[in-house]
Amino acid sequence: MADPKHKQPENANGKWYVDSTCVPCHVCLDEASDLLSYAHDESHVYFKKQPENAEETKRAANAMQACPTEAIGDDG
Ligand code: SF4
């Protein structure tokens, strides 16, 4: 389960976030490349944009379900 106390610093402000357990493995980017992005050093992924409608929220939820390390949270 993702931990809002360990959010990646680049996450856009809002409830969706990636935490420090991101590997990164790229799986979430296949689900929501419009919302998520690699950090400059490619050490992790972060939310470059919060979901703003039902379609984007569904993609964020799909990314959260697909993440093998449960690094994506929606309670931030
Ligand atoms: S699926 Fe999870 S571990 Fe993989 S890059 Fe995305 S947030 Fe990181």
Image: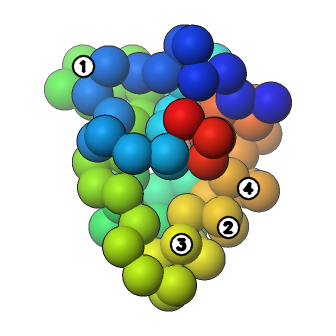
Judging by the rendered image, the residue that carries numbered circle 3 is: 57
Q: Nearer the viewer, mark 2 or mark 1?
A: 2
| Mark before the other along the chain sequence, 2 or 3 | 3
Q: Quadrant of ligand 1?
A: top right
Q: How far apart are labels 2 and 4 at the CA level?
A: 6 Å
**Residue 69's quadrant in the figure?**
top right
Q: Which mark is residue 41?
A: 1
Cα–Cα span, label 4 and label 1:
23 Å
- Sequence-wise, the earlier of marks 3 and 1 is 1
Q: Which residue is disc 2 drawn over?
A: 62
* Horizontal side of residue 70 vs 49, given as left or right: right
Q: Residue at x 54, y 13 (%)?
A: 6
Is ligand 1 closer than 8 angstroms to the Cβ of mark 4? yes
Work out which residue is located at the far bottom of the displayed protein and give it. Answer: 55
Residue 74 drawn at (x, y percent): 61, 47
Q: Which residue is mark 4?
A: 66
